[in-house]
Image (cartoon, rainbow, N blue to C red):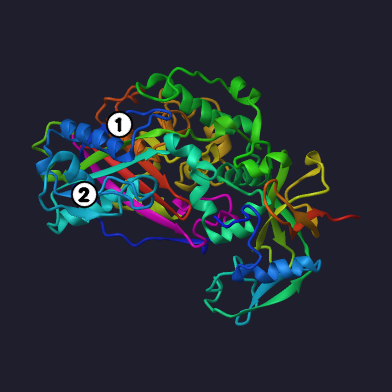
Amino acid sequence: MQAEFPLPDVHWEPARELWKGAARGELHMPRCDSCGRYVWYPLPPCRHCGAAQWTWTTASGRGRLFSWSIVRHAWIPQFADRLPFVTGLVALEEDPAVRLVTYVVDCAPPDLHCDMPVRAVFRPLRYPGVRGEVTAPMFAPQRG
Amino acid sequence: MTDDWGFASELDDVGGEIAIVGIGDADYSKASGRTTHQIAAQATERALADAGLTAAEVDGIMYVPFSGDQFDDAAFHAHFGTSHDLWVSDKGGGMVWAGSAPYEAALAIRSGKATCVVNTFSVAWATQRSQMVGGPGQVHAEDLCKQNLEVPFGWFPQPVYFATIARRHMYEFGTTSEQLGAIAVACRRHANLTPGAVMRDRPLSLDDYLRSPLIADPFRKEDCCLISDGGAAYVMTSLERARDLKAPIVEVLGVGVGNSRTGAYWSQQGAFTSTPQVFAATGAFAMAGIERDDVDVLACYDPFTIVSLMQIEDMGFCPKGEGGPFVEGEALHFDAGVLPYNTHGGMLSHAYVLGIAHVVEIVRQLRRQAAAQVPDAAVGIYGGYTGPQASTLILGRR
């Protein structure tokens, strides 16, 4: 396990652009140069066309909450301080086949529902006993 | 949802070629200090005794290499003091392979590479748990995509994955907590009847289930499998040779294997509320030449209640999405006459030995020697699962 586990390794090449974008408040996602579909997870080959080249582009940050769990048990000690938390999957507006794993924030659990519109917000990830923090895309309900 | 999210493996027809002639359980327990080799050796000894065979008559051994501590040919020889040639396959073990190992064994027996093959699986995760990251989740935490793109957001380990799948199943199909609870209650009742089951003395009612706290909403503790030490083994040989052995003949009628194109990345699986049983079961039923109505007893790899429910749907015992109403009440109980399911208690209540004990239980049912015996059981199925793959093993009493 990497030294800052469970923080992401922002230098891990396949996802480096995601964290660079998040630090600027943008959701950067890889699009296949050959077929134009999003490539997620960002490992070759593109599962739609088999190509191996893609370009990171800025996505709208809008999507829908595909599903989630309210976690009330700490399976690893680093999560204990956050309990309970809402973790789940967001289907991207640009391509709902792409689901980002994320924390759902700014929403009381009774107000959560599948397919509710959400938008990316950029918040620091921190874990007790782990050095540093990483700005990461989390998702909150779309207003209005 | 189209079905391009996965595919069936192409398999030769091996129906009716081999039989399972010996079964052996190791002791099932919470943390015991035992090693996987000790556990598998005990299971293998018992399986050979059950078959009436000696270690010297075994000429094939199957195991899974994934944890690096399984009962391979070197461990077999070290334990039994033998040194003869063995056909060795790493396509055995538990999980999906507990169901597909008979296919590989049948090919080996057909081609003369082996005549008598033992498949084992053992686990000591109850003993090892404190050294693991997230217990059995460690293998997922080590995957760099998960380590960097899932774990940082609290989506880890398996109970959280499958709680998320259960939530979506509830949304799409109206599945309820009471329906998931019915699965847990059926498994516990069966474990209460089964000697050696880890939860044998711990009854569970649906009210108990519903009062239990949510740990990964919508899951309660009782939706999740145990963490156990234990294992089992089974012995396979040709149908011809099986006639000379003492046990009632349980033959391999059909095998199927299905695959998900997104592997173990559940987050990205196209059909989020399905398992690759969609692709595995069809081929196995065709090979066996039977219909769903012919099945007397079913055992599925059941890490979570929702995985049981999805496999029951995906094997075609009810239409997709109707698994909730199908499993309600006592439909899965061994004596209800609907679909007797995990009649030893499964991984939820018998032991978490990753499916190998399920196959042993199906054989026991077809021999009419089970604790929670289904009357006149003649056809039984094991549904294996790993996420990336599923297997369907159809066994029949001859």
Can residue B1 be seen here? The reply is: no
Select label 1 or label 2 by which is in front: 2
Q: Which residue is mark 2?
A: B74
Mark 1 and mark 2 lie on one chain; the one further toward the N terminus is 1
- Residue A120 occupies quadrant: bottom right
Q: Residue at x 58, y 37 (%)?
A: B324
Name which residue type carries label 1.
Ala
Q: Nearer the viewer, residue A116 or B352?
A: B352
Give, as a single range, the part of the protein colored magenta: B249-278
Callout 1: helix, strand or loop? Answer: loop
Does A6 appear above or below B187?
below
As measured in the structure, the alpha-carbon distance from the residue carrying label 1 to the one carrying label 2 is 19 Å
What count of labels does the image hold?
2
Percent across and percent down for residue B330 are 50, 25
Q: Quadrant of the C terminus of chain B?
A: top left
Say the numbered circle drawn on residue B179. none
- Residue B271 occupies quadrant: bottom right
> On the rendered structure, is A11 left or right of B305?
right
Q: Residues within 10 Å of mark 2 (few under 14, many from 20)?
A: few
Can residue B239 be seen here? The reply is: yes
| Magenta stretch holds residue A21 | no
Q: Quadrant of the N terminus of chain B?
A: bottom right
In which chain is the residue bearing label 1?
A: B
Name which residue type carries label 2.
Ala
Percent across and percent down for residue B307 are 51, 42
Percent across and percent down for residue B46 are 21, 31
Q: Which residue is mark 1?
A: B26
> On the rendered structure, is A78 left or right of B312?
right
| Magenta stretch holds residue B257 | yes
Percent across and percent down for residue B209 are 60, 25
Which residue is the extreme one toward the right?
A144
Q: Residues within 10 Å of mark 1 (few under 14, many from 20)?
A: many
